[in-house]
Image: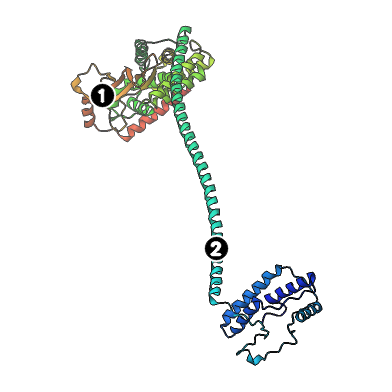
């Protein structure tokens, strides 16, 4: 049976037809005709014993038909009117009513059917299993479709993201290419600037040389810069050496009691030692006295030991050129810089060094220091002459120093032949001059015994160039070792300790005496 409250299609159709007939022709009677729906119901009754799944499927189809039939138009009539109308129709048609119809026996349903028997719709069979499988398949398909849609959406999102990343990559690639081009352009610009800088530096050096040359020309025109030839320098140097020898010969004629000890004391003051015996060391008396004059007087001016040349400023400039320059003899660039500095400083000095009070005090101090060092060899009668000659020697050294400072070349004083203190130096005729020219060459060795005068070495030229080359303008005056003196000293014995003590006492007494005497 269909569910309660839901009419069968035949009932609904009959109700609609009856209500339609009642509304239009309420008095018209229509014969009762068995509808196709009723025949269908009979077939359903015969299939009550079929598979429940088929019945369930029929119920679902029935429900679908009921739901789909809800959209149809129904004319509602009251139950009384419907019953009255049905009775009237039955009376008019001459057919028996439902109440007059013989009620069929339920027990006979399964056997014979009366043609007037009212056939009630039976239960519809269940859905076939095929429809269930189809529905399950549809559900699976719908699930796969949803999964496909979600994955399609993800693919579209990934595709969009990939396109965005590709656009970003292309943009970064363009920027990278631009950066590489900019870097290449920057490198080319740096190379161009570097080459231009080198060119400007070369031009700057050329202009600097031209400027220095112009300044030198201007100084030469103004009279403050003078070119001196090598012969001028050597002449002045030779005059100095001659005056030193004359001073020793004429003024230092006194013979002390212990002359050998006195000479040895002077040698220790000079920082030199001799391999000769104390008795034979007297042969170096003249050479030692000459060297002391050179170191006290000449080098006091030429090395800037005292402010005798242009005061304190000249002393400082002299020390820089002579002392600092000798530490860099193999550095031409340094010597060239010293030469330029010397010329610029000379431009600020006066034409000739002035003999002011400061200079006079410095010269007098130099003379007194020299006299005190040689008091044992200076007779009292020669003190005034010694002071006068020392003054002349100092002024000559100052004039020579002025000539060397005005020159673009640089001059150094070197004691060639001194050796290292442990071994005697070898005689070099190119840079040394032996003072024993009157002696036989067979009696002399090639070892230098003592150096009495330094050598004058020149770096560069008068034009301020070629500082990598040097020239020995004036040779060093040396005393060579005498073979006869060496053999004699080896046979003799050394003096006793008592004689040394006596010599020391005599030296101390003489020093006390000379200090107590008034200066002449």
How far is the residue under mark 2 from the one under mark 1? Answer: 117 Å
Q: Nearer the viewer, residue 451 or 58?
A: 58
Q: Can you identify the residue that label 2 sits on?
A: 145
With respect to residue 421, does 310 lie above or below?
A: above
Residue 406 pos. (x, y %): 43, 13
Mark 2 residue crowding within 10 angstroms, few (<14) / some (14–19) / many (20+): few
Where on the picture, by quarter, is residue 43? bottom right
Query: Regarding mark 2 in the picture, which secondary structure is present there?
Result: helix
Q: Residue at x 25, y 18 (%)?
A: 436
Q: Quadrant of residue 381?
A: top left
- Element under label 1? loop
Estimate how packed mark 1 is, as few (under 14), some (14 to 19) or many (20 or more) residues with alpha carbons within 10 Å: many
Q: Position of residue 445 (x, y in %)?
A: 22, 25
Q: In the rendered view, would you say 475 is above or below 170?
A: above
In this view, which residue lies farthest toward the left? 442
Identified at 67% across, 83% down, the residue is 120
- Where residue 388 appears, as percent x and y from the top left, is 43, 12
Pointers 2 and 1 in contact (C-beta within 8 Å): no
Q: How many marks?
A: 2
Q: Nearer the viewer, residue 83 or 54?
A: 83
Quadrant of res 199: top left
Pick whichever, 268 or 191, lies toward us: 191
Which residue appears at 72% of the width and 77% of the height? 31
Image side of residue 394 versus residue 6, left or right: left
Which of the two discs, 2 and 1, labels the residue nearer the N terminus? 2
**In what quadrant of the picture does the N terminus appear?**
bottom right
Residue 297 visible in the shown view: yes
Give the x, y percent position of residue 456.
35, 18
Seen from the viewer's position, the closer of residues 79 and 322 is 79
Mark carried by residue 427: 1
- Circle number at residue 242: none
Q: Is residue 391 visible?
A: no
């Amino acid at each position: 049976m269909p569910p309660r409250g839901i009419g069968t299609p035949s009932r609904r159709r009959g109700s609609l037809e009856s209500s339609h007939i009642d509304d239009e022709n309420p008095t018209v009677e229509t014969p009762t005709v068995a509808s196709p729906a009723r025949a269908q119901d009979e077939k359903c009754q015969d299939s009550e014993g079929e598979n429940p799944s088929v019945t369930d499927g029929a119920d679902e189809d029935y429900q679908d038909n009921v739901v789909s039939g809800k959209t149809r138009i129904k004319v509602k009539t009251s139950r009384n009117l419907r019953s009255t109308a049905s009775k009237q129709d039955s009376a008019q048609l001459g057919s028996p009513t439902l109440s007059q119809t013989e009620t069929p026996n339920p027990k006979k349903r399964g056997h014979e059917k009366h043609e007037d028997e009212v056939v009630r719709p039976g239960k519809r069979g269940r859905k076939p299993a095929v429809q269930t499988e189809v529905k399950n398949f549809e559900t699976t398909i719908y699930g796969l479709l949803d999964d496909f849609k979600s994955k399609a959406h993800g693919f579209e999102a990934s595709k969009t993201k990939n396109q965005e990343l590709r656009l970003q990559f292309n943009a970064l690639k363009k920027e990278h290419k631009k950066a590489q081009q900019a870097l290449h352009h920057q490198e080319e610009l740096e190379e161009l600037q570097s080459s231009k800088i080198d060119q400007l530096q070369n031009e700057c050096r050329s202009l600097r040389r031209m400027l220095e040359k112009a300044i030198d020309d201007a100084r030469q025109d103004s009279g403050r810069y003078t070119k001196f030839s090598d012969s001028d320098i050597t002449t002045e140097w030779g005059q100095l050496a001659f005056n030193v020898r004359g001073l020793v010969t004429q003024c230092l004629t006194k013979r002390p009691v212990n002359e050998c000890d006195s000479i040895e004391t002077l040698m220790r003051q000079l920082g030199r030692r001799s391999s000769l015996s104390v008795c034979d060391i007297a042969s170096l008396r003249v050479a030692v006295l000459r060297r002391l004059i050179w170191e006290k007087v000449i080098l006091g001016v030429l090395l800037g030991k005292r402010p005798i040349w242009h005061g304190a400023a000249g002393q400082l400039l002299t020390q820089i050129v002579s002392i600092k320059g000798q530490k860099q003899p193999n550095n031409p660039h340094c010597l060239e810089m010293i030469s330029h500095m010397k010329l610029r400083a000379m431009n600020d000095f006066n034409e000739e060094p002035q003999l002011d009070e400061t200079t006079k005090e410095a010269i007098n101090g130099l003379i007194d220091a020299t006299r005190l060092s040689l008091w044992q060899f200076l007779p009292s009668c020669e003190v005034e002459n010694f002071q006068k000659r020392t003054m002349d020697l100092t002024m000559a050294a100052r004039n020579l120093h002025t000539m060397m400072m005005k020159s673009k070349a640089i001059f150094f004083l070197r004691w060639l032949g001194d050796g290292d203190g442990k071994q005697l130096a070898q005689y070099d005729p190119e840079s040394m001059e032996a003072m024993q020219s009157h002696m036989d060459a067979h009696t002399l060795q090639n070892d230098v015994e003592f150096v009495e005068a330094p050598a004058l070495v020149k770096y560069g030229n008068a034009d301020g160039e070629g500082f990598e080359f040097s020239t020995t303008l004036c040779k060093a005056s040396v005393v060579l070792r005498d073979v006869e003196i060496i053999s004699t000293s080896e046979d003799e014995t050394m003096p006793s300790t008592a004689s040394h003590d006596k010599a020391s006492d005599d030296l101390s007494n003489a020093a006390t005496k000379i200090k107590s005497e008034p200066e002449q």
